[in-house]
Image (cartoon, rainbow, N blue to C red):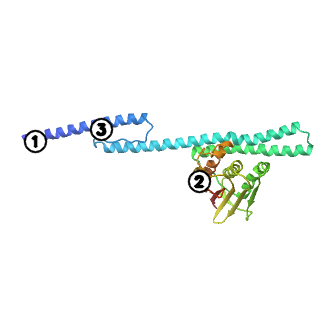
Amino acid sequence: MIAVIVMLAVLAAVLGVICLLQRYELYSVEKQLKELSTENTNNLLRSSTGTADRLVTEINRLLKEIRKIRVEHTRKSHAMEQMMTNISHDLRTPLTSALGYIDLIRNADISEEEKKRELEVIEQRLMRLEELINSFFEFSKIISGGKIPEKEVLDPVGILEESIVHYFDDYESRGRCISLYCPQRRLKISSNRSMLLRIFDNLVGNALKHGSGELKVSIVQEDVLRVTFENPAEINELDIEHIFDEFYTTDISRTKGGTGLGLAIAKQFTEMLGGRIEAKAEDSVFTVLLEFNV
């Protein structure tokens, strides 16, 4: 009888110690959670006594999931901020051009034939502006909602030529030119027209802002579709390493008012379309290579 009482007393003492340890563990978990809620940290909970390991493990799993969701939310918000930063510049370009031609028609002494040509240019610029506005709505839905881009079978040569034509006058006004090498005139690819045009626009526009001399563009389809943009530019290995980073600008691009978004957006859209983009610099020649599955 005495032995039974002693065993019960020992068991009660052990249970009491376990309860005390678990109570202390819960207090420690509560204290750590309060600290984590007020700090921007990646720390996880630590078990003080080992009596609530399963609880601590589960809470740490939830903490990791919450942080993952928070990072993804921050990324999407940042992507939207990028887009809004870039919208003002992209919309202003065709609008400013159209206003310039309107002022020319209004104030210059030009013939009716010349006015007709200028009005056609204005129409092209305003149509370009409308296309950009429509595209931005689509881009915002894709980026913010993780929406898969809608694809269709299209001719990448025609889209590339459209981008080159858009910048042709700007290059010519700077004493520069664009050459296009395309041995196959009719190519087919499954892609998103608006996003592909934006990629080409950003790369041609980036070469205009930060490059010099002739921009050589080639588009060839073999096992994959390869599009290459090549022009002289002052760039080093550090620039190449970070060239596709968001908001990254070189010393040269800072003096030219670059936003550091053009190539970052080109990279993002290329990857969203299932493609690959890379850059390299050799002998003061800057090259960007695009590859898409056909």
Q: Which residue is mark 1?
A: 4
The alpha-carbon separation of the residues under discs 1 and 2 comes to 80 Å
The secondary structure type at the circle numbered 2 is helix
Task: Tell me if label 3 and label 2 are in contact, CB under 8 Å.
Answer: no
Q: Which residue is mark 3?
A: 25
Mark 1 or mark 3: which is in front? Answer: 3
Task: Please identify the quarter of the rendering in which residue 153 is found.
Answer: bottom right
Q: Earlier in the sequence, mark 1 or mark 2?
A: 1
Q: Earlier in the sequence, mark 1 or mark 3?
A: 1
The alpha-carbon separation of the residues under discs 1 and 3 comes to 31 Å
Q: Which residue is mark 2?
A: 237
Percent position (x, y) of residue 276? 60, 57
Mark 1 or mark 2: which is in front? Answer: 2
Mark 3 or mark 2: which is in front? Answer: 2
| Disc 3 residue type (three-letter) | Glu
Checking the image for residue 128, the label placed there is none
Task: Please identify the quarter of the rendering in which residue 32 is found.
Answer: top left
Quadrant placement of the C terminus: bottom right
| Disc 1 residue type (three-letter) | Val
Label 1 crowd bin: few (<14), some (14–19), many (20+), radius 10 Å: few
Q: Earlier in the sequence, mark 3 or mark 2?
A: 3
Q: Can residue 92 be spotted in the picture?
A: yes
Q: Can residue 155 be spotted in the picture?
A: no
